[in-house]
Each structure stands twice: as C-alpha cells, then as structure tokens.
Amino acid sequence: AWDDSLDRVADRLRRIFTAAQGTSTFVNLDMEEYHDLELTIAAFTRVLDEQPYRADEAGIVLQAYLPDSFPALQRLVEWAGQRRRAGGGEIKIRLVKGANLAMEKVDAAMHGWEQAPYPTKADTDANYKRCIDWVLTPERTEAVRVGIGSHNLLDVAWAHLLADARGVADRVEIEMLQGMAPSEARTVRDERGRVLLYTPVVAPQDFDVAIGYLFRRLEENSAEDNFLRILGQLQPGTASFDVIAKDWRRSLAARWEAETGRRRSLDRSRPYEPVGVAPFANEPDTDPTSAANRQWALDAIAAGAGSLATPVTTEIEVVDRVVDAARRAQRGWAALAASERRRTLRAVADELARRRGDLLAAMVHEAAKTIAQADPEISEAVDFARYYADRALELESDAAAFDPLGVVAVVPPWNFPVAIPAGGVFAALAAGNAAILKPAPETPRCAEIVAECCRSAGVPTDVMAFVRTPDDDVGRRLVTTVDGVILTGSLDTADLFRSWKPDLRLFAETSGKNALVITPSADLDLAVADLVQSAFGHAGQKCSAASLAICVGDVYESPRFRRQLVDAVESLVIGPVVDPATVVGPTVGTNPRLERALTTLDPGEEWLVAPQRRDGAEHLWSPGIRTGVAPGSWFHLTECFGPVLGLIPARDLDEAIAIQDASPYGLTGGIHTLDPREVATWLDRVEVGNAYVNRVITGAVVQRQPFGGWKQSSVGPGAKAGGPNYVRQLGVWRPDAEGDAERDDERWLAAALASDEHWWAVEFAVDHDPTGLFCEANVFRYRPLPRVGLRAGRDARPVEMARVRAAAARCGVPVVESTVDDETDADFAARLPSLGVERVRVVGSVDDAVRAAAMAARVHLADAPVTADGRVELLHYLREQSVSRTLHRFGNLVSGG
Ligand code: FAD
Ligand code: NAD
C-alpha cells in the first residue's frame, strides 16, 4: 500500500503544514514504528519540496537504534542542503535512540523476522554517537538544525562540547521530556542557556491517552539498561562511575564500526532457498518494510497466475476413473517408508514457497484477497506441508497399527483457497492416503497451483489427483465413492454430505458465529483495533471472523468506545483488491443471509455504521455495525460471512459468556480484559476450539495455534488442522496383531490402562506450547467432553467395554451406556437424538440405521477398533483447544494478562 499510503500521509501533512503557516507552531514528525520509517521520510521530503511549503521549516526524528538511521541521516542532510540552496527553508532533525524497542521485538518474534533495531545497547549507543559526530559540522548543519533528544547526560555533554568545538553550537539544541529528570534539565539549561522540554497536550476528554503516554515513558526510563536508572550513581571517583565511563568510552571508540543499513534480509526478489527436511520452523511472511518486497508483490499480481489448465469434469464416469486410479496408486504410496513420504512433502513445501508469487496472484485475482491477507496464507500452506510431513513419522506405535483410509477427497472453500486445500491434501498424503483435490468452483487456479507443486516435487499423479466438479451429481459421486472426505465449508454442506451416505467418513470444519467479549477492564484502544481487524479482514469472509462484540457493562454505551470503533471502521480503505491500499475488498458473491445482514435490521437494532454498496459495484460493501442485537435473535445465532458486525450488551461477564456459548457453533472466540481473574473465568467456560485473549481472533498459524472448532463447527473426530492429531485421524488404528494376540484379556486390559496413564501424563493432561514465543502464549490443550455415549454393538467384547469405560473415566468424562442386549439398534437409533451427547463410542458393530440416525442428529460415531494404545483411545473423550494469549502491553511483558 506504499504509494497510496504515501499519498494519504502526504495529504495529512499538507493539511498540518497549511494550518501551521503564519503561526508560531513548529511541526515535528515523531518516529514510532520501524515500518513507518521510509514512509515518514518520503512524505516529509515530498511535501516540503512542494511549492506552498518550500519555505516552511519542519522537523523529523531519527532513531539511532535502527541501523537504517545513519544512511537516512545522510540522505536527509543531502536533500535539505539542496532544498536550502534552491531557496527553501531549513529543517530540524532530532536524534534519539528510539523508544519502541519492546514492540519491535514483538513484531519480529511474531513474524519470524530479524529484529529491526540493533541487538545491543552498545550498538545503539555507538550509532548515536556516529550520527552526532557525522552531522555536527558547519557544512552539514547549514540547512539542518540538530536536536539531541536524550537524558543520557554523558551523550548530552559530549554533543554539547563537540558542538562548541566545531563551531556549530547555535545549530544544536538539547531536548528532554518535561518532568522526567528535572534537575538534569536545569543543569543543562544553566550550562547552555537553553533546553527544550517536551510535554504531551491533549483535550480533557482524551486524558487517558496522556496517561498511556506517560506510563510508557516511565516504563521505558525505568528499563534495565536506561541511563536514568544510574543517574544517581554518577559520582566521579567512585567505582560505578568508572564502569559507566569505561562503557561510554568504548561505545565512542566503536562509533564507526556498528553495521548500517537494513537488518532484515528476507528479499522475495531473490531465488528461494529450499529448506528440505530441516527442523520445523514457521515460514516467514513477506516483510512489507522492504521496498524490494513491495515491488515483488506488485510485479507478481501484475504478471498473473498463469491460466487454468484443468477443465470442469461433467461426467460421473470420469470421476469413477479418477477414483479407481487413485485407489490403485495409493497402495504404492502407503507402502513407502514414512521418511520417504516426509521427504516428498518437504519438497512440496519448498516448491510452494518457490511459487509464492503465482499463489499470491491467484488469490488476489480469484478470491478477492488483499496482498496483506493473501501472503500469510501462502506461509500457512508451506507450514502445513512441512508440519504434516513430520507427523508421518509418528504413525508407528508399539500398541496399535495404522492403516490409511485409502482415497480421500479434499473439498475446500473459496475463502482460504490455498492453505485449506493444501492442508487437507498434505495431511491425507502424509497418512499414506491418495488425495483427490476438488477445488471450490470460485477458486480453481489457486488449488491447481497447489496440485502442480505436488507434481513437480514428485508426488505421483494418481496419488494426488486434481478434479473440478460442479456442485451437482458429479460432485456428489466423488464425495460418496471415496473412503474419506475432508470438507471445509458451511454446516449446510456438511449436512448435505451426511444425508447422502450413512457411513460417510467425514472430517469437516464448518461454520462459526464468533464473538469477542470486551469488558470494562479492557484497554479500549487495543480492543477496538483488534475487533475491527477480526471483523473486517478479508471483508469478514473468514470462518474465524468476529461477527459479534459482546460489550460488558458500560463498554456498550461508552462514547469513547463507539467513537473509536466508528472512526476505525470509517477509515478502512474500501476498494478493489488489486489496489494494494485496499483493506476491505468485495465479497465473493453474496448469499441470502449476507444480503439480509447487510440490509435488514431486526426489532431493537440500529445501525451504528450503515453498510453501503459502493459505486454500483454489486459485491463491494462498506462495513456495517449494528447495535442492539438481542440474545437469541437472528443475527446472534446466524453465520452471515461478510462485513457486518453486531454489538450485544451484557450486564456482566457471566452473562457475556452465556451469550457467547449460546451459539450452536464453537469455532473462535476472544476476550479483551486486563483483569487476570476475568481471563481465568472466561477460559474456564468458553466453548470454542480457538480462544484468543487480548488479541485478534483470526489468523491461526500452523503448530502455534492449531485450528478447528467445537460443537457444530466440526464434524467427525475433530482433530485440529495444523495440530498434532490431524494426520493421525486420517486412517484406522487397529490392535497390533502380533502384540495383542499373545496376551490374555486381563493382561491386555492392564497394558491398556497403563498406556492410558502414560499418555494422560505426557500428552493429554499437559499444556503444550511448542512455539514458545516470549510475547504470546499459545497453549494447545485437551478438554473433556461434557459426556459421551457408549454403545456396545454386536460382537462387542466385555474386555473392550471395560477398556473404553476406563478410558472415559481417565478423562473424567461421564458416559451414557447402551448395549445391544438391552436395546436393539433400531431403538438406540430412535433414542440417539435425545441422548444429549455429541459423540458415541461404538464397540463392535452397529447397523446403518444407527449411522443414519447419528448423521441426522449430528452425532459423531467413534467406531474405530478398540486398541490398547492410550494415545489413540483417550482422544475419543477429549476435545482440543488452542488458547492464544498476548503476554505484553506495548512490548512490555505483563504477568497474568
Ligand atoms: P539511554 O539510557 O542512554 O538509552 C536508552 C535507549 O537505548 C533505549 O531507549 C533504546 O533506544 C536503547 N537501548 C536500550 N537497550 C537496548 C538494547 N538491548 N538494544 C538496542 N538498543 C537498546 N523516541 C522515539 O522513538 N521517537 C521519538 O520521536 C522520540 N522523541 C523524543 C524526544 C525527546 C525530547 C526525548 C528526550 C526522547 C525522545 N524519544 C523518542 C525517546 C528516546 O528515543 C529514548 O528512548 C530515550 O530518550 C532514552 O534514551 P536516552 O538516550 O535518554 O537514554
Ligand atoms: P460451501 O459449503 O458452499 O462449499 C465448500 C465446498 O463444498 C466447496 O468446495 C463446494 O464446491 C463444496 N460443495 C458444496 N456443495 C456441494 C455439492 N453439492 N457437491 C459437491 N461439493 C459441494 O462453503 P464456501 O461458501 O465455499 O465457504 C464458506 C463457508 O466455509 C463458511 O460457512 C465458513 O464458515 C466455512 N469455513 C470454515 C472453515 C473452518 O475451518 N471451520 C474455514 C473456512 C471456511
């Protein structure tokens, strides 16, 4: 969004400079985040070069903790000299060390990028001195006045002496923050005759903003390495003074040595370096602070994604042939060593990464995704390939044997047109299945490129087939003839598939109606920012999108909250996605639900921001916010899948959680509060697969936040995508023939219970955070199902029943039992809908009547053979949850937040 952002920042500057003209106001551009550095300099120089502002004087700040700052200083001095010689005004450059270090560290850790600032304070100190030393000459200060913004008395004193010695004292000003070190400021004033003090000025209604600012300054100035902490020890002749002086001299001596220029090396215009089978690490997203990367993205979408080569299949016979060929080819694939499948999938990952540009273009053009939304999805696809490749090695167990299902159809949605098809295909392949990828009709090219990557990395053609079918009898044929179906789509589609075949092995991730709870203990600024991003990223067309904000207590009526929200939503850039400035693009079609959500209010509801169709474009809507959404109302409970957000008031946190949990879905959910007790209460009770605390509720990353929902948001065994159990569920675990046959029942049962204890202790009772970020906890954990049905069908052996009862008990899950001796399959089928369970563990065999009843009642029949492996059996009683929790505020770590 570079050019457009530049235009907008420049516009803003023009207005500011115009207002300042003819007054005594001096405009100075402070510097905050690294990603704004180049933009700020570009806007500053552009506008000051324009005729109405050529004579204006204005200031800009450079942060010495950035190695980019020294070259930037040189460029600015050069430019200012030219401007001055052409009759323009002078500028001021304030040199500071940089106050945003903590957030820069967070930004780098979250993205897997190098940190933008220097790694050590010694480097920063050295570079600060280099900048001062370089700029303080009569020639370089001709058009530039220099501000030394620092409380480091040694640096200030040195700059002061240097300025005197070089005859430029009148071009240098020492600048400090009002109230931060008053005695120091007085001393400097007495010595130099003048010191410039800064203080924030805000309107009374924005007083909390000033508090926030002051708090951050205090936090920073009391940080470990900060000079103000040692100011009191500055007694010449003492040991501590000698240490301080020595360090200072060392940084002075090193001032020309610290590296300059960008620290981040990721450059998409260079050829991709394959990673192969190296240990898993998340693939980094494209870093937009690099001009080369921005150009790469624009070139990629201009070049397009190549044309679609696969025609739509309109005949059932063709589908049958593809399935047959896949079935034959699958045996060879499954017979490969797991390490061989892993190697091939790792090669697919490299191939996808190499074709990032094509995938980006396909998503922008086919799925109306913005560059910012599309790019991370490619990283996710690459991660899926590597992560699932590694899981292939875990399918060997002493206590059970694993057979792949056979042929698995992957049926993805259009809204994540690369990562979701990729994830399904790679998981199926890792488990030893053949995969048939049937893309969403809207986004075939995105999926076709994934298929091309599989081929070029060596997956045999029939092992990974690509077929485009319409959503008609041909599509139905595919779904009903394969051995397993991975669907990601709406609950309606899952229900349709279930109605076609009672014994369909369906693994579906379905709809969501996701809410973010905001309590009066939240930081409202952060809550609003996260809410808007969660609600309107990809025009709200994410299954994880926030569609509701449940506002606790006075948050709901808070003018401050509403003003921020409206302001944030109204400033979203709406337009076509080929324009990199766009944040909200068009919806990919509309459905009657979305149409209703965008146009019709229910009793008691009002528009806080009314959605509007843009410029006659059928699918381009500006986002809408409805207030007064009542618990139990249509909007509360219906997935609308587009740019509409509803606000629901709640008296207290209890009521908010009740409203959140009233949804039939349980995909994502969030809370914003700084009160650790509220976080604990919420985490204990919220019924969602992905729970987010004090952050956006979208954007799951493989391994870091395995993704998938509870309740009606998931169909089948329910392992999360990008998590440790996803590959394991795409096959059948059966008793290990050799091991089990030798044992008598009693010993078998004892071994099973011992295995349960073991896996309970090392896997299921444990919070897992394999990513281990310092700034965000990402805990993957298991929660017991509220209750589970237990059906002893024909041929169920008593020892197996004893084994599954014990497993349920180990997990603390109550069971509702039924046996074929007490109740026929037909009677059980009739009773199923009223059992109040979402899962039934089936031992032995049951009729299709039971299967059909379960499908209709949306109950999962866990009918896998009973094994002695606790790693396999205990999963039937548990559901998985990912809890992601921000651990910092503005980069500073907080406990319990
Ligand atoms: P010192 O203690 O000498 O330096 C502390 C600084 O060293 C830290 O702030 C950090 O920049 C750096 N540092 C510390 N540890 C590390 C490490 N491990 N690795 C790398 N670097 C490290 N800051 C801005 O970002 N933008 C502004 O626009 C801005 N305006 C300011 C205006 C004034 C008048 C003043 C006084 C400060 C301003 N600051 C601004 C804050 C400034 O950047 C410093 O953060 C602050 O002054 C502390 O630095 P120091 O030189 O006073 O103290
Ligand atoms: P959809 O249900 O309309 O389609 C999903 C897939 O099913 C497509 O490939 C489609 O072609 C196929 N399909 C539908 N009817 C079919 C038929 N009769 N025969 C054969 N195939 C058929 O969903 P969509 O509109 O593509 O995507 C949006 C939906 O997906 C939303 O409900 C959203 O919540 C859900 N979704 C869920 C997740 C998740 O992880 N839970 C992720 C993304 C999207």
Image (cartoon, helix red, strand yellow):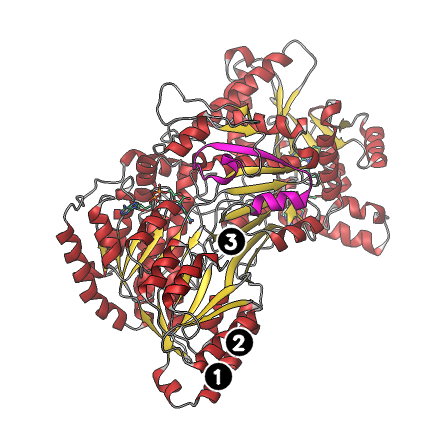
Question: Which sits in the foreground, 76 or 39?
Answer: 39
Picture quadrant of residue 809: bottom right
Helix or strand or loop: what does disc 1 sit on?
helix
| Residue picked out by circle 2 | 806
Q: Residues within 10 Å of mark 3 (few under 14, many from 20)?
A: many
- Front residue of 164/678: it is 678
Image point 75% across, 34% down: which residue?
Answer: 211
Residue segment shown in magenta: 633-661
Q: Residue at x 58, y 68 (%)?
A: 812
Q: Amino acid at mark 1?
A: Leu
Amino acid type at mark 3? Gly
In the image, 402: left or right of 710?
left
Disc assigned to residue 749: 1
Q: Earlier in the sequence, mark 1 or mark 3?
A: 3
Q: Is residue 525 left or right of residue 419?
A: right
x and y, in percent, of residue 254 in the image: 63, 48
Q: Residues within 10 Å of mark 2 (few under 14, many from 20)?
A: some
> Residue at label 3?
689
Decide if residue 353 is in sight here.
Answer: no
Q: Secondary structure at mark 2?
A: helix
Is 645 in the magenta?
A: yes
In the image, residue 65 sits, relative to residue 776, either above or below, namely above
What percent of the width, then of the height, locates residue 423? 36, 54
Mark 1 in CB contact with mark 2 (< 8 angstroms): yes
* Mark 1 or 2, nearer chain start: 1
Amino acid at circle 2:
Ala
Residue 615 position by quadrant: top left
Whether residue 832 is visible, yes or no, is yes
